Image (cartoon, helix red, strand yellow):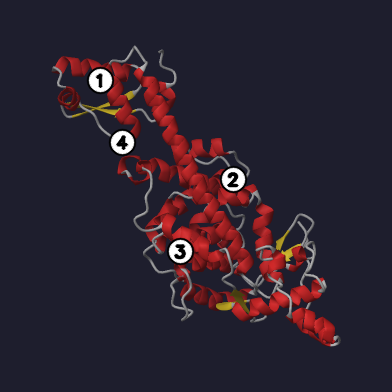
Amino acid sequence: MKIPKSPPDIDALWPQLLENIEDLQKFFGTDAESATHGKYLHWDKLQRYPPPEGLSHQQWWLALKINRQRLRKQVPLRDKNNSPFNYVVVDPIPERLHCIDQGAAGLIAMPDQVTNPNTKDQYYVGSLIQEAITSSQLEGAATTRQVAKEMIRTGRAPRDRSEQMVLNNFKTMRRIGKLKDQALSKELVLDIHRMITDGTLTDLSAMGRFRRADERIVVADMYNEVFHDPPQADQLEERMAAMCDFANAEIPADFVHPVIRSIILHFWLAYDHPFVDGNGRVARALFYWSMLRHRFWLFEFISISQIILKAPVKYARAFLYTETDDNDLTYFILYQLDVIQRAIEQLHEYIRRRTQKLQAIERELRGVATLNHRQRDLISHALRHPEHKYTIKSHQISNNVVYQTSRLDLIDLHARGLLNRLKIGRTWYFTPARDLEQRLGKLPS
C-alpha cells in the first residue's frame, strides 16, 4: 500500500484564485458537493473524478475544504504538533448512527436464539472466538479458524505464539463484557494490554507498560516505508489521561454520539501507539468496551475484525486519510460505521441461516423412523435448549407415559450418542450432546 497523496495547502490556493475575478465568480457560484456524488473524498481520490465545470481540481478541493471547515467539530485528541483532530457530521453518518441506535441497543427485536438464555451463550462464545481469531490475524497471527476454534473449545494449551495471541484475545473479550461498568483508567488500559500480550512478547518486561523513549516504534511495511510515527514516549502519560477523560465522557463539553466516541477512542489508542506491540488489538478491545458501556449490548455478538480482515488495506487507508488531511477523523468514522453496519447485517444473516438449518433438521426428524414421536419432540426441544437437563420423571410427565417407557426413550437416545448422561445422587440427568446437530445428520432414516 502506498501513502496517500497529501492535499494541497489551501492557504496557498487562495492567492491563485484571487488573481482572476472570473475564476472567483465561478468558484462561489458552483455547488462543489454535488460533484462528489455523496462521497467524502480525500484528495488522493478526488483527482480521479471530473471537477465541476469551470473549476480545476485544486479549486474544487478548496471549495470542499471551506465547507468542511465550517461544519467541523474538534475533539480533545491532538497530533504530535499539538494540532487538534476534528470531524464533520456528513451524510450518511446521521442515518447510520440512527440505525445502530435502533438495531444494537435497548429493547431491540432479535431472534429468540440470541435473547433466550438457553441458547445465548452459543452465539456469544461463537462471536468471541471469531473476533479473537480475526483480530489476531490482523496483527500477523498465522493460524486457521478451525484450529484456533478447536483449541478454545477443547481447552488445550496453545502450541505457538499465534495460538497464544488468539487465546489471549478470547480471554480479553470475555473480560471486556465484565469491565463495561468500570470507568476507563490508565491502569485498566495497561491491564487489558497485559491480558492481550501475555506470553507473546520477546521482551516480557514490555507487557502492561508504555513504550520507553529508547523503544522507537513506527508503523511500516516490509520495505520499511513508514506510515505512522507516533507521539514521543514522554507524552504518553498525559495523552493517556486525556484519552481516558474522553472515553469516560468527561470531555469535551459538547455532545459526542456514543458510537462516534467509541470509534474515536479506537483511533486514539492506535494513533498514540503506546505499546511496543498489541496496539491494534487493544484499540479494538477499547472500542468494544465503549460500545458495551453505552449499552449497545448487541456488540456482545458482533465481530468487527472479521469485516476488517477481508480488506485490511481499507482499514489502514482510513487512518492515513485522517492523518494526511488536517487530522480529519471523518474518513475513519465513515469507514468504521460501514464496518459496523456490515457486521450487524452479517450477524442477522448468520442467525437466519442457522434458524433455517434448525427448521430443516426438525423437518427431517419427523421422517426418522428409528425414533418415536416422543424422542423426536425431545430432540427438537434440545436443539433450541442445549443446556436443558432431562430426567426420566420429567419425560414421563411431559408425555403421559409410564416410567419404563420414559426410561427406555432416554436410554435409547443416550445409546445413539444424542444425549449425555450423568447421575447425581439417585437421579440420572440427560443433556444434549455438544455436537447434536452433526450427530443427527448421521442417523439412519
Which label sits on residue 290? 3
Which label sits on residue 374? 1
Say which label, 3 or 2, has the lower sequence index: 2
Camera-side residue: 233 or 438? 438
Q: Which residue: 36% across, 28% down?
A: 433
Query: Where 413 falls versus 234 (above or below)?
Result: above
Percent position of residue 182, x then y: 38, 66
- Mark 1 or mark 3: which is in front? 1
Q: What's the amino acid at mark 3? A: Ser
- Mark 1 or mark 2: which is in front? 1
Q: What's the amino acid at mark 4? A: Glu
Q: Secondary structure at mark 2?
A: helix
- Mark 4 or mark 1: which is in front? 1
**Is residue 215 visible from the viewing direction of this image?**
no
Q: Which residue: 34% across, 42% down?
A: 112
- The CA distance from mark 1 to mark 3 is 47 Å
Q: Which residue is mark 2?
A: 162
Q: Which residue is mark 4?
A: 387
Q: Secondary structure at mark 3?
A: helix
Assign the N terminus to one quadrant of the image.
bottom right
Q: Secondary structure at mark 1?
A: helix
Query: Where 327 falls versus 103 (above or below)?
Result: below
Say which label, 1 or 3, has the lower sequence index: 3
